[in-house]
Image (spheres, rainbow, N blue to C red):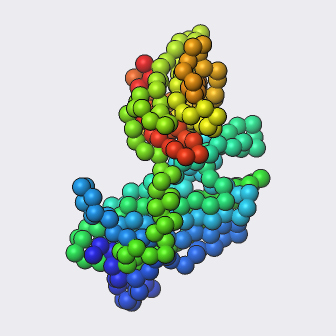
C-alpha cells in the first residue's frame, strides 16, 4: 500500500516512524499548521494518497490564496525532503475577497483552511514519507511571516482526518468548459475596447439570490490583473445571470493581452468552478 509506515531519517540517525493520520502542530504567535493524511485512492490515472496541509489562524486573522489580489503573499510549499514521493499536487479551496486595509482588495482565507494534497509515490510498492517546509503570511491589521516544518508517515488507511480532507476537496473549484450548463456556470467571456483600454465582461449564471464572486488570473504568476467587479446585467438577460467586469491591465512586462489565456474562478456558497478562456 502506498505511503505506509516508514523509516525516517531524523537528526542523522535512522528511526522507525509510526504510521500517522496527522503530524504535530507547528505553532506560531497567531497560527498553527500541520500535515494530515487519509486513505490511498485508486483512479483511472493511477494510485495516489489523500493528504492535506491544515492551517489554523487566530480569530479574525487571515492568509492568502495562490493569487492574493491587490496585496498579500501566497503560501509556498517545499516538499524536497520527502522520501519515495514522485509528485505532490496542491489543491486550492475556494477563497473569499476582503478589504486589504489600504484601499484595495485581497483574496484568501479567514480562521482556518485545509489545502488538499494528492501524493504519488515513486515506487508504489515501497513506503513513503512526506516532508514539507511551509511559508505563509498571517495577517490582520499587520502581516507577519510564518513558517512550519512538517513531517508525516501516513498509514494510507481511512482514519480520523478522512472526513476533513473530503470536505476540503469539495470546496476545490472544478475545471469545467466555458458555457457548461450547471447550477453555477460561466456563460461568456468577451472583450471590449473602451477608449483605448481592453475591458473584459464575464457573465455568470447561478440561482437567484445566491451570492457569487469571481476571480481572474493571468497565464503566468507575474500577471497582476484587477479583481473583477459586479455590474448590472444587460437588459433582457436571463434570470439569475450576474455580470462582472475588469480592465485587462496588470500584464507582465512584454506580454500581449490579446489572445492571452486567463483562468476564471467563480465561487458561491455551494459551488466553485474554474474555467480557462480567451476573452474574445
Residue drawn where x is 49% and y is 37% of the image: 183
Q: Residue 175 location in percent, x, y? A: 40, 42
Question: What count of labels does the image hold?
Answer: 0
Q: Residue 252 location in percent, x, y? A: 49, 32
From the image, which quarter does the C terminus lie in? top left
From the image, which quarter does the N terminus lie in? bottom left
Q: Is residue 90 visible?
A: yes
Name, please, the residue furthest toward the top. Answer: 195
Q: Residue 246 location in percent, x, y? A: 58, 25
Determine which quarter of the picture holds residue 12: bottom left
Location of residue 89 with respect to 257 vertically, above or below: below
User: In the picture provided, is 139 more to the left or to the right than 216?
Assistant: right
Determine which quarter of the picture holds residue 207: top right
Location of residue 147 with respect to 13 vertically, above or below: above
202, 127: nearer the viewer: 202
Residue drawn where x is 66% and y is 66% of the image: 31
Q: Is residue 217 visible?
A: no
154, 177: nearer the viewer: 177
Location of residue 136 with respect to 132 vertically, above or below: above
55, 254: nearer the viewer: 55
Q: Residue 150 location in percent, x, y? A: 50, 73
Residue drawn where x is 63% and y is 73% of the image: 27
165, 194: nearer the viewer: 165
Determine which quarter of the picture holds residue 244: top right
Residue drawn where x is 60% and y is 13% of the image: 235
Amino acid at each position: 500500500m502506498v505511503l505506509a509506515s516508514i523509516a525516517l531519517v531524523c537528526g542523522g540517525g535512522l528511526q522507525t516512524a509510526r504510521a500517522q493520520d496527522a503530524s504535530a502542530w507547528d505553532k506560531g504567535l497567531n497560527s498553527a499548521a500541520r500535515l494530515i493524511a487519509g486513505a490511498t485512492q485508486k483512479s483511472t490515472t493511477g494510485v495516489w494518497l489523500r493528504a492535506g496541509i491544515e492551517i489554523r489562524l487566530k480569530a479574525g486573522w487571515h492568509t492568502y490564496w495562490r493569487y492574493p489580489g491587490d496585496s498579500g503573499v501566497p503560501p509556498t510549499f517545499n516538499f524536497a525532503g520527502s522520501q519515495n514521493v514522485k509528485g505532490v499536487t496542491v489543491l486550492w479551496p475556494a477563497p473569499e475577497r476582503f478589504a486589504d486595509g489600504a484601499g484595495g482588495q485581497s483574496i484568501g482565507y479567514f480562521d482556518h483552511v485545509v489545502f488538499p494534497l494528492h501524493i504519488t509515490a515513486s515506487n508504489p510498492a515501497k513506503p513513503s514519507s512526506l516532508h514539507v517546509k511551509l511559508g505563509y503570511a498571517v495577517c490582520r491589521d499587520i502581516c507577519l511571516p510564518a513558517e512550519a516544518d512538517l513531517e508525516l508517515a501516513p498509514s494510507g488507511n481511512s482514519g480520523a482526518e478522512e472526513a476533513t480532507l473530503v470536505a476540503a476537496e469539495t470546496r476545490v473549484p472544478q475545471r469545467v468548459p466555458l458555457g457548461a450548463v450547471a447550477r453555477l456556470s460561466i456563460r461568456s467571456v468577451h472583450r471590449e475596447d473602451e477608449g483605448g483600454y481592453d475591458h473584459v465582461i464575464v457573465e455568470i449564471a447561478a440561482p437567484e439570490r445566491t451570492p457569487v464572486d469571481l476571480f481572474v488570473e493571468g497565464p503566468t504568476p507575474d500577471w497582476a490583473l484587477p479583481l473583477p467587479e459586479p455590474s448590472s446585467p444587460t437588459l433582457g438577460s436571463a434570470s439569475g445571470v450576474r455580470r462582472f467586469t475588469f480592465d485587462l491591465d496588470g500584464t507582465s512586462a512584454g506580454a500581449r493581452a490579446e489572445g492571452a489565456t486567463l483562468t476564471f474562478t467563480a465561487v458561491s456558497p455551494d459551488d466553485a468552478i474554474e474555467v480557462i478562456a480567451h476573452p474574445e
